[in-house]
Image (tube, coloured by chain):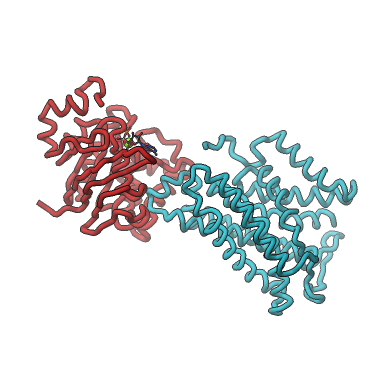
Amino acid sequence: MSESILGVSDLRVRYGRVEAVRGVSFEARRGQLVTLVGANGAGKSSVLNAVSGLLRPAGGRITFEGQDVTRVPAHKLVRRGLVQVPEGRQILATLTIEENLRMGGWHAGGRAREAIDAMYARFPVLAERRGLPAGSLSGGEQQMLAIARALVAGPTVMLMDEPSMGLAPKIVDEVFRVIEEIRRSGTTVVLVEQNARRALRAADHGYVLQTGEVVQSGPADELLADERIIAAYLGGDGAVDQR
Amino acid sequence: MQQFLNGISIGSIYALFAIGFTLVFGILDRLNLAHPSVFAVSAFVGIELVERVGLSIWTALPVVFLVGGLLGLVIERVAFRPLKNRPDAHFAGLISSIAIAGMLIALLQWRYGPDTRRFPPGSFPGTDFEVVGARVTLVQVVIVAVSIALMVALTYLVTRTRLGRGMRAIAENPTAARVLGVNVDRVTAWTFAISSALGAVAGVLFAINVNTAQLGMGAAIELKGLAVIIVGGMGSLPGALIGGLLLGLAEVFAVEYVGSSWRDVIAFGLLFAILLLRPQGLLGARKVREV
Ligand SMILES: Nc1ncnc2c1ncn2[C@@H]1O[C@H](COP(=O)(O)OP(=O)(O)OP(=O)(O)O)[C@@H](O)[C@H]1O
Ligand SMILES: [Mg+2]
């Protein structure tokens, strides 16, 4: 198996007196799709935001490509290829689609143009509307823009926070198709999802988070096969969310 | 016509000052109340440069621009950055920038005393022109030209350059900007530097226009600047330009046709009237700012 490209050990995140992440460890190997699943408030976003440098962890260690990046700020990590598609898309609504994509290439310099054109080829909707404010796109299109924008940065590891949130089932299929393509292109993906079945079906490896701790982990197909895990931590299909 | 041209020249100084003010507000959502003191300090620095260093008033302008930029960096570093993560960062920055303003003015007073300062005699070219029956001095022409050039350059910077795109990204959504790899601290520092550099040039131009610099000149323009950016639409650069010119014209015409004691009544009255008609300001977005 290939080497570990992202390693997180004993990560802690605190908001004032609340400890939202309590000693989470996981790793992603080069080219893998790893998923962190869990209910609302399990601490998934907190983990991702600490890894991407948006939050300063209260403890623990994060390594990226063999180097300690525990307290490296976000802008330096993006330059190094650790790129996040944040929760809620966070598109720049009043800027045009083109400008959003160019912001994705903030550190990419001359390579950005080529990458942007590749995104236009992959997502024709974005090409058609390149001059319009990004806020005029539908939710699903905005999610595609957020993903495309992150790809323009040329990530080696992509952190995705609930990319299927609030989207219609057909669009969710499309999002997962794109995620699959990204993985096939060799980019390592860390996917955070509430939609656990869906995420585990796409992933190589899974971690189940509950109230800030990893309660289960293993190869995704094994987690998926174990109905007890799904029932206990993630809620069965149509069942009430159990916390 | 004469009054119109005079109004344009003073109005372009107001506009330049207000654009610096509104730049920081529009991008960073912070009101930098040290801006008026940069305006005052720069007027004194400009006179000093001409008197002691022997620069001409025109070569003093780029130097003052740089001095203003440096002051902006200091203000950001001291009054804003340390407070940025506080939940009350808006209010805290307001207060700490007032404190910096107080310190800067106190330093001026210590260095120059309370007296009015003037450029040394012979600093101004005597050249003037006839424009459709009105007299325009070369000084006025340069004031308007410098103001316009700086405003055009700023517009280009904000709309066309990478730094400008970073600024607009931060204005729109600071979290998104960070996620995309923008060094928000660095762009913030640049924004303050540019804003203060514009305020500084406005300060010397003002001193050149009336050939005086006074301790109170910052306080005098502060309220006008705030009025202009509110009327122009908070954060709107073209709004600040139009607001500044309107204020300059209103003042000059009020003095000419009504009397100098009515200047502020008429000028601010006009601004209130505009706000009654357009509460969001001339070019302000209609959307309500999210807190
Ligand atoms: N900025 C904050 N300040 C205080 N508490 C926070 C903050 N952000 C998150 N929390 C708390 O930390 C815990 C974990 O939140 P987090 O957003 O990481 O969960 P999540 O798994 O991403 O949830 P969701 O599925 O709803 O996105 C929650 O209890 C939440 O209330
Ligand atoms: Mg979340």
Q: Nearer the viewer, residue A217 or B265?
A: A217
Q: Which residue shows up at 42% across the image and 41% down it?
A: A129
Give the percent coordinates (x, y) of residue A18.
35, 37
In the image, the chain rendered in cyan is: B
Q: Which residue shows up at 65% across the image and 57% down it?
A: B101
Placement of B140 over or under B53, stated as above or below: above
Q: Total marks drawn?
A: 0
- Asked whether, in this view, residue B166 is left or right of residue B275, the answer is left
Task: Look at the image and tell me whether residue A114 can be seen.
Answer: no
Farthest-out residue, top? A239
Task: Quadrant for residue B207, please give it.
Answer: bottom right
Q: Quadrant of the N terminus of chain B?
A: bottom right
Q: Which residue shows up at 20% across the image and 53% down it?
A: A5
Q: Nearer the viewer, residue A86 or A180?
A: A86
Q: Nearer the viewer, residue B80 or B23?
A: B80
Give the percent coordinates (x, y) of residue B93.
57, 49
Give the percent coordinates (x, y) of residue B2.
85, 57
Placement of A212 over or under A63, stated as above or below: above
- Asked whether, in this view, residue B192 is left or right of residue B119, the answer is left
Task: Quadrant for residue A169, please give it.
Answer: top left
- Asked whether, in this view, residue A201 is left or right of residue A168, the answer is left
Task: Look at the image and tell me whether residue B120 can be seen.
Answer: yes
Chain A: drawing colour: red
Task: Quadrant for residue B152, please give it.
Answer: bottom right
Give the percent coordinates (x, y) of residue A20.
31, 38
- Which quarter of the frame holds ligand 1? top left
Q: Which residue shows up at 71% across the image and 54% down it?
A: B14
